[in-house]
Amino acid sequence: MAHASTGALAPHPERNDAQFGKASIGKLAMWIFLITDAMSFSGFLLAYAVLRSTMDWPHPADHLGINLSGFATFILVCSSVSMVLVIDACKHKNRQSMLNWFLVTIGGGVIFLGIQVYEYQHLVHLGMTFSQFAHGNNLFSSTFYMITGFHGLHVLTGVIYLICEYIAARRGRYDNGNYDRLEILGLFWHFVDLVWILVFTFIYLV
């Protein structure tokens, strides 16, 4: 006898036949993307280090909001933890907990972006634009906006990615406990968090 519908959304089956060793093709593709992306960030930070070592360079603490950016760093790290809890809730087939932690992760990314926009507005008001720095070497401001802006674009992409997967979760895609897609998302989000720690250290602290 066919079971009567309970009104719940039916889980979407996930295909797991595409594998490369123990990793899915999706995870392998994400790792390849992250490796190439890491090279881009490495190039930016290396160029920044060379310029800073060969020129009269302003002290970051005199011009950048280190305390505010430190708080933004804390928020982003916390969102990385909540992303882990999203996957854990999916493993235990706890939809509500998964959705709640999704919202926490998305909120962390949005708060980080809001702080970055506020910081940019404040710095522009103080005479620090992409092409001009009123208090010293113009390359200080251009490299700052280039590197932090490039990372901010990644955070924005990650937030959109998170929202798309949150909608999929609400529709029941992960009710079957298959968390492979969430782990792929987690790889990207953890990468974004890790890169920011390096950017914050090099740009704001060193």
Image: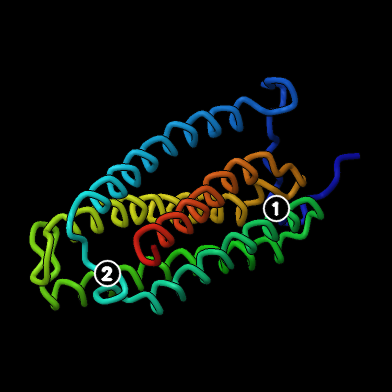
Residue at horizontal 39 percent and vertical 62 percent from the top: 206
166 sits to left or right of 33? right
184 sits to left or right of 144? right
Residue 87: give its label.
1
Residue at horizontal 52 percent and vertical 48 percent from the top: 191
Q: Against 85, is 31 above or below?
A: above
Q: Residue type at mark 2: give it.
A: His
147 sits to left or right of 11? left
Q: Against 123, is 87 above or below?
A: above
Q: Nearer the viewer, residue 83 or 93?
A: 83
Q: Which colour scheme appears in the figure?
A: rainbow
Task: Tell me the CA gap for discs 1 and 2.
Answer: 41 Å
Mark toward the start of the polypeptide (1 vs 2) = 2
Q: Is there a contact, CB below 8 Å, between mark 1 and mark 2? A: no
Which residue matches tag 2? 59
Q: Position of residue 184 (x, y in %)?
A: 60, 41
Q: Position of residue 21 (x, y in %)?
A: 73, 21
61 sits to left or right of 85? left
Q: Residue type at mark 1: give it.
A: Ile
Q: Nearer the viewer, mark 1 or mark 2?
A: 2
Secondary structure of residue under mark 2? loop
User: Within 10 Å of the Cα at label 2, are there few (<14), some (14-19), or many (20+) other Cα atoms?
Assistant: few
Residue at horizontal 48 percent and vertical 58 percent from the top: 197
Q: Nearer the viewer, residue 71 or 25?
A: 71
Q: Position of residue 106 (x, y in %)?
A: 51, 63
The quarter in which the N terminus is drawn is: top right
Label total for image: 2
